[in-house]
Image (cartoon, grey):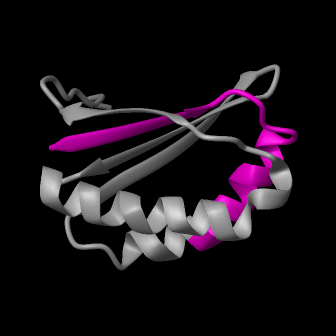
Amino acid sequence: MYMFVRKYTKVRSVADAARRAKSGIGHILRESPGFRSYYVLDGGEGVGVAVMIFKDRESANAANDKVLDFVKASLHDLDLGDPEIIAGEVLVSMESNA
């Protein structure tokens, strides 16, 4: 698996960005080959973090380019700025047995 983490530090409204991302980015990701999961968290004080998990690096990179284009075009009014991006192979993955 391959993961992208994008951290925005000056988000005017993380809740609004997440709501809008759910439909727009959600649509992009659901149609992207290799897509596994997507999460958005509110880190407080204008910090928003988005996590995308894919089957492999190639599908993650392809989707990330589309997502960044969507963010620039559709969420520009939230003054997100450029995200800090961390990406890499997932080395450990655990889920609850419950």
Q: Quadrant of the N terminus?
A: top left
Residue 54 image offset from top left, x and y in percent? 24, 53
Task: Judge left or right: residue 9 versus residue 50.
Answer: right
State the residue lying farthest toward the front: 82
Is any atom of residue 22 visible in this view? no
How many numbered discs, if any?
A: 0
Residue 41 image offset from top left, x and y in percent? 62, 34
Magenta-colored stretch includes residue 94: no
Q: Quadrant of residue 3?
A: top left
Identify which residue is drawn at 20% across, 43% down: 2
Q: In this view, does 55 lie above or below 23?
A: above
- Please name whichever residue, 48 or 85, is drawn nearer the observer in this view of the structure: 85
- Please name whichever residue, 19 or 96, is drawn nearer the observer in this view of the structure: 19
Magenta-colored stretch includes residue 14: yes
Q: In which quarter of the image is residue 92?
A: top left
Identify which residue is drawn at 77% across, 31% down: 10
Identify which residue is drawn at 50% across, 44% down: 39
Q: In which quarter of the image is the C terminus?
A: top left
Q: Give the range drawn in magenta.
A: 1-24
Is any atom of residue 72 visible in this view? yes
Identify which residue is drawn at 58% across, 68% down: 70
Task: Judge left or right: residue 87 versus residue 81.
Answer: left
Task: Judge left or right: residue 91 versus residue 94.
Answer: left
Q: In this view, does 74 lie above or below 52?
A: below
Residue 12 image offset from top left, x and y in percent? 87, 39
- Please name whichever residue, 58 or 72, is drawn nearer the observer in this view of the structure: 72
Q: In this view, does 20 lie above or below 95?
A: below
